[in-house]
Image: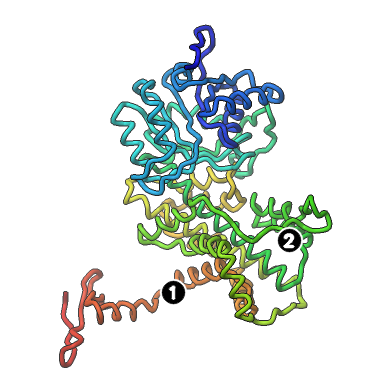
Amino acid sequence: MSKKVDKSHVRLADIGVIGLEVMGKNLALNIADHGFTVAVFNRSVDKMKAFLAEAASREPSAERLVGCETYREFVQSLQRPRKILIIVKSEAEDQYQLDAVDQVIEQLTPYLDRGDVVIDGGNSMWEATIRREKQLAATGFHFVGSGVSGGEEGARFGPSLMPGGTREAWRIIKPVWTAIAAKVEGGTGKPIAGASPGHAVRGGVACTGYIGPNGAGHFVKAVHNGIEYGDMQLICESYELMKSLLGMKPAEISQVFAKWNRGVLDSYLIEITADVLRQRNPDKPDAFLVDCVRDTALQKGTGKWTAKAALDLGTTTASIAEAVFARYMSADREQRARASTVFRGPALKRLGNAQAVLRGIRDALYCSKICSYAQGFALMAKSQKKYEWKLNLGQIAMIWRGGCIIRAGFLQKIKEAFDREPGLGNLLLAPHFSQAITKGGRGWRKIVGLAAECGIPCPQMMSALAYFDSLRSARLPATLLAIQRDFFGAHGFELLVAPEGERYHIKWPEVGRPMVRL
């Protein structure tokens, strides 16, 4: 048993952080940089002590960190109402599965008082968050599921934060969340840089805001991650097209991405891609790292949750789903290796007009990106009825404008589109994006066609184009599908001349096949 420490003379901490892996450590330091005292706890006391020792040697705000060795000591070190941020790995795939988050909550709650706020800052499934909100509310505690995006650097110097829970819980945590979030310029939405250890960014608009109750924060974070899957896959497909069609080397492709980052494709992921492609293998300096890495991509599951949510809600995130499937395909290396010896693909064409091809790839990337974001925002809009949310989609776009992995210049245009038309059904119908699709559509189609002709896998670009063509079609071949279902299952169909919802059936086995109203 740990020796009880008398901390009566010590100022109570403003907030506590549980879990000192990469995100937890950096969030604690970020909070301390903004003038808050932070109590820290980790299941491994040695890891907590090591963190404090390292911080003391290099972090200007280390004096604001308070280490605690037991849950009792940790809770008693916090001023009321207590604010406790949990950053541990969540593995629950649905509302019923218990995981490490539940274990921490179980150990915390005996020491909490009514009105205290417990915050889950990990990637938790939103239905598990809904369950936890209800459970803690029944005992008088607040529970906040807060999406956190930005990786290690974002956590340290300013992430994008997506808090759910009650409005009262948001009122309590708001001073901390608005302080530590990334900042953007109010008029332009451009991220404000300049944060460093001990020196926080001042001014600007904080990339956070109240999302809603009932797991809304974690749902929005899941959609964010689904869009992130899509962005990364599209960039990878663009890289492969440049390599296969134009025979470009990593350093040359890096230059192209760096140039694109100065235009409409300005984004964090494009920026780091240009950097990554320049990287040499430290163990083999004459080779680029990208040429030395096994082609298997891992995932944490949030992209899958996004695709599943779309299926459950009866809408489409086909492009995002394709990005998830692409990762699954990358993992199936054994079958791919076997198939590569069985099937001979089309001969690759090396094209002479490189600049024209590059323009086409850029157009395909940008148009597909717009479609992917359109699907993500449409999913959020569709979710509101089921979960009783009132999501401010323009605000969400602003929250993603700085700090997070998908931060990009065109998110400002998304915010402006929803500001002009809050009930906008699909981003593609906003003037800015409809014009962009119209302008880039020819190049997009040429590249997708060329990829198919040359046997270059571009599943997301192809899926995005199919989505766009389906969206712009006033009449789809689902007419035939409806009749097929009626033929074998008597499911019925709707007639164009009849009121919507009125269904009819053909009595297929009978003579003359009469039609009746169901």
Question: Which residue is more in the foreground, 497 or 8?
Answer: 8
Q: Which residue is mark 1?
A: 473
Horizontal side of 143 relative to 512 (left or right) equals right
Horizontal side of 316 relative to 435 (left or right) equals left
Image spot of residue 40 (x, y percent): 54, 24
Residue 181 appears in the figure: no
Q: Residues within 10 Å of mark 2 (few under 14, many from 20)?
A: few
Image spot of residue 454 (x, y percent): 65, 78
Q: Residues within 10 Å of mark 1 (few under 14, many from 20)?
A: few
| Badge 2 amino acid | Asp
Q: Pick whichever of labels 2 and 1 is earlier in the sequence.
A: 2
**Of marks 2 and 1, the one in the foreground:** 2
Question: Which residue is more in the foreground, 346 or 513?
Answer: 346
| Badge 1 amino acid | Ser
User: What residue appears at the point 63 percent right and 66 percent down from the top-left corner?
Assistant: 363
The vertical placement of 482 against 370, above or below, is below
Quadrant of the image occupied by residue 202: top right
SS for tag 2?
A: helix
Q: Separation of disc 2 and disc 1 at Cα? A: 42 Å
The vertical placement of 345 against 272, above or below, is below
Question: Which residue is more in the foreground, 279 or 137?
Answer: 279
User: What residue appears at the point 46 percent right and 54 percent down from the top-left corner?
Assistant: 377
The vertical placement of 101 against 289, above or below, is above
Image spot of residue 473 (x, y percent): 44, 74
As drawn, which residue projects farthest toward the front?
Answer: 1
Question: Which residue is more in the foreground, 338 or 359?
Answer: 338
Q: Which residue is mark 2?
A: 291
